């Protein structure tokens, strides 16, 4: 299942919790940094 969450420039507590739940459930989170994209799983 694919889930896309656009948290760009808006890091509310509810979005951060959703991102944490994706990581906890074994999902992959990709996020832009200042130089490259970071990947967390």
Image: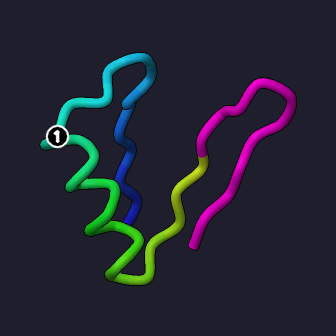
Residue 1 forms part of the magenta stretch = no
Mark 1 residue crowding within 10 angstroms, few (<14) / some (14–19) / many (20+): few
Q: What residue is shown with label 1?
A: 13
Q: Residue at x 34, y 79 (%)?
A: 24
Where in the figure is residue 18, as x and y percent of width and height? 23, 54
Q: Quadrant of residue 37?
A: top right
Residue 37 forms part of the magenta stretch = yes
Above-or-below relation of 6 to 29: above
Question: Total label count?
Answer: 1
Q: Secondary structure at mark 1?
A: helix
Q: Residue at x 53, y 66 (%)?
A: 28
Above-or-below relation of 39 to 41: above
Q: Quadrant of residue 35?
A: top right
Residue 27 shown left or right of residue 17 in the figure: right
Where in the figure is residue 39, as x and y percent of width and height? 68, 58
Near-viewer residue (20 or 3): 20
Where in the figure is residue 41, as x and y percent of width and height? 57, 73
Near-viewer residue (12 or 8): 12
Residue sticking out furthest to the top: 9
The range drawn in magenta is 31-41
Q: Residue at x 20, y 31 (%)?
A: 12
């Amino acid at each position: 299942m694919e889930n896309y969450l656009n948290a760009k420039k808006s890091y509310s507590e509810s979005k951060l919790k959703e991102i944490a739940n994706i990581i906890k459930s074994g999902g992959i989170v990709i996020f832009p940094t200042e130089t490259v994209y970071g990947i967390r799983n």
